[in-house]
Amino acid sequence: MINNEFKNKLFEAAAANDISDIELFFLSSKSDSVSVYKANVENFESSSKSGIGVRGLYNGVMGYYYSEIVEDKDIPNIIDSIKQNAGIIDSSDEEFIFGGSKSYAKVNVYNEELNSYSVDDKISAAIEMEKIALEYDPRIKSVSSSVVASGESEVYISNSKGLELSEKSNYLMAYVELIAEKNGSTKEKGEIWIGNKPSDLDVVKVAKNAADKAISALGGSSVPSGIKNVIMQNEVFAEILGCFASSFYAESVQKGFSLLKGKIGEKIAADIVTISDDPLLEDGRSTTAFDSEGVATYNKTVVENGVLTTYLYNLKSAHKDGVESTGNGFKSSYKGTVNTSATNFYIKGGNVDISTLKKKLNNGLIINDIAGLHSGANVITGDFSLAASGFLVEKGEIIRPVEQITIASNFFELLQNIEEIGNDLYFTSYGMGSPSVLVKDINVSGE
Amino acid sequence: MLSQRTAYNMLDTALATGADFAEIFIENNVKNSVSVVNGKVEKALSGRDFGLGLRLICGDKAIYVYTNDISKDNLIKIASEAAAAVKNNVRCVIKSFDKKDYVNGVGEAVIMPQSVKKKAIADMLKSASSVAFAYDSAITQTQMSYMDSVQDVCIINSEGLWSTDHRIRTRASVSAVASNESEKQTGYFAPGAMSGFELYDKIDLDKLASEAASSAVTMLKTSPCPSGKMDVIMDNGFGGVIFHEACGHGLEVTAVSKNASVFAGKLGEKIASDKVTAIDDGTLHGKWGSINIDDEGTPAKRKVLIENGILKSYMSDRFNGKRINYPLTGSSRRESYRYMPVARMTNTYIAAGNDKPRDIISNTEYGLYAKYMGGGSVNPASGEFNFAVNEAYIVRNGKICEPVRGATLIGKGAEVLLNIDMVGDNLKLAEGMCGASSGSIPVCVGQPMIRVKNMTVGGRG
């Protein structure tokens, strides 16, 4: 926890140096991680770290500084850096140090039980996960990673306007990556699980899921190029949604980096598409009661039956549009400046299961893996062209695995072209969620 | 940053339960960044990363603990926590420290970043922004950014190593977006170096901004790239990202030692066409990916990875290299004290060949000319890679014809290496950030113009 004496000295120094409002953001965390190779612990990692992010208003402009050392003698440097950094900012947008919301939701993000889940428990879980994966099928050649880790962090925000908030959260994570091989065909696949209840961790399931993914992909080949109808599996579409989530941020819209400008109240997706941002979701990966500016968070529908209802706002972008912040002003850590970020951001699940989706697809592809999102997608235009793999579907049945193809489309066209939504809502480890979706007219490049 | 006595006590505590090796990594990293959007300074940030990591190796097991509380009590506490993960009956003897300071070597700063006025940085970025906007009325947005980092590291180990390095790096990026009613296209360059602020006397950001604008405008007026198999000509510079992704990662002992690379067990074998010689060289003066010593304290080296198609060398680190008894190659790197070091690339490139770029183009009946490559990724086990092309043209009857947008190249590294049939004489390096298990680190990629036969090209056309 931060030393109160340091905070008081910092706030006094700010006041004495024409910094009208100042805020201290403190994040401390610790973690333990065990990685197993051939039934032995290969790596054990343990960390305890903390850092401060300080920001202050100087001549009405926000200046930032961060440090991983908290010491009184650094205060003059902190004050000076804030003034220097604020001194060159040109933006005329008004910025705020926030006094606090009326009330904050209670969220359940810290589980005491996890404290008794020891390093030895992690070691046995990781060894078991590796063993199950290796014994699952003779085609599983090796397990390249079997990792079980846990961690906790505490965020504390205090400012000269009287805001004083803290939140503690923890997590448990299991990850396995393995290689399947047959007749010269090699596939490496992984599976990750994150939660915070040790009783929810099912290493058998994690290992089997990874093994099934790798085995089912063996012996794949390409398909002829063409325009095809496709089922984007839940994991894949959640990743794609995450990649383009910034289009929904008012900050991007205001800067001209989003094609959703001027689209509030307009139809931007098929009728069956509803997208929510729910920071209060039970067991959500991005669940939190307040954002990095201290604004209380709440659940909101961003797209309702295809119609765009709101952008996501922080205090600055909200002020610019004359609305209230939606509680989406986040910084990535104590190091960053406040930007906008979605929390648990997801497409609402539909009613049909995957076999009904396949029947409806009839002839086409299931895409269950993509690569290259960080390079092959243009977050502004929505265009993407990605390496992909999955299965060929004929007459509603899976025929064979497919690899070495690319899929190309446009995210905004894709939203319009969603024909059916599955009931298998899935969340990525960073809180993006989607069910499997059936979409038409994807450009597939193969042979 | 640490007294000799504290370091000794820490190593001694760490080794008490029988580890073979203990290593301390201390880092102080002072960073600055400025970002200018549409000609206005939007962000200016400065700060300091500081922390210590302790690594123990015991046989085939590695333990890593890190913290940013370097009080003596806490250091001894984390050392005993690390030791608790080891149970062995030997006692390794700590050798006396041999202090080496690598302050100057592969790159030194004439103008220290901290001495530069923030306003001078802001003005430089604003000027580049004006140039991009002035290039064409289709330019609707610009983003320019700047960063510098002064990283001091000290590596101390139980074998008597006590080495310090002082790494000063700076990088700027220029990006211009061209728009019409329905489309937006981006042009982007990001030069960097192991150097002080004098870098910006040597490179012309305005000129790069103009080139970025030109690339964006060119790509705006294009039709989508056709898809299918065709010959692909990749131009020099950042085109080397193909080698970095499709082959370089597979030559790191992290993957090789676990048989998780298509190149495992292939030393001395032919893995590429005769035309291909590839090198990883951390010693190039002033280059973005250069290092005096790696993050285990081994001096950087020049390694011929592939010579005329024959696999000659892997890139190694102490822990993973030991699994296959591979010698250290000065390749062990990490983003910061928060990561255990592993084998990584430095400046990695395909060496110049004998073909003239104009002959490569005139000898291509039909194909894709990838002028500027984007980023990509690879699965080291299968060698499957993908990457984006930022500026591409169709080649027809030996001539560069119309530009096309949205092209993606996919393939398997092992196959592409064998299908490189022409290698130009115009080698050039380009800067990038490489992400892997030990974090995001500065690297150079590079190549002359090369031609790959029969690659899969993805696009919407």
Image (tube, rainbow, N blue to C red):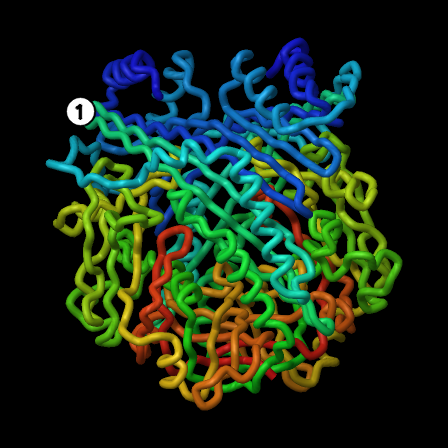
Provide residue A239's location: percent of width, then percent of height: 42, 61
- The amino acid type of the residue labelled 1 equals Gly
Q: Is residue A30 left or right of residue B164?
A: left
Q: Position of residue A29 (x, y in %)?
A: 42, 31
In the orientation shown, which residue stands out farthest toward the left?
Answer: A102
Q: At 30% from the left edge and 65% from the top edge, which residue is drawn?
A: A259
Q: Image quarter for residue B19?
A: top right
* Percent position of residue A84, x then y: 36, 27
Q: Nearer the viewer, residue A131 or B415?
A: A131
The residue where tag 1 is placed is A162
- Residue placed furthest toward the top: B5
Is residue B7 shown to the viewer in this render? Answer: yes
Viewer-proximal residue, A48 or B153? A48
B399, B15: nearer the viewer = B15
Circle 1 SS class? loop
x, y (%) of residue A197?
38, 43
Q: Tell me which corner region of the image, top left, top right, bottom left or bottom right, holds residue B359.
A: bottom right
Q: Residue at x 60, y 74 (%)?
A: A404
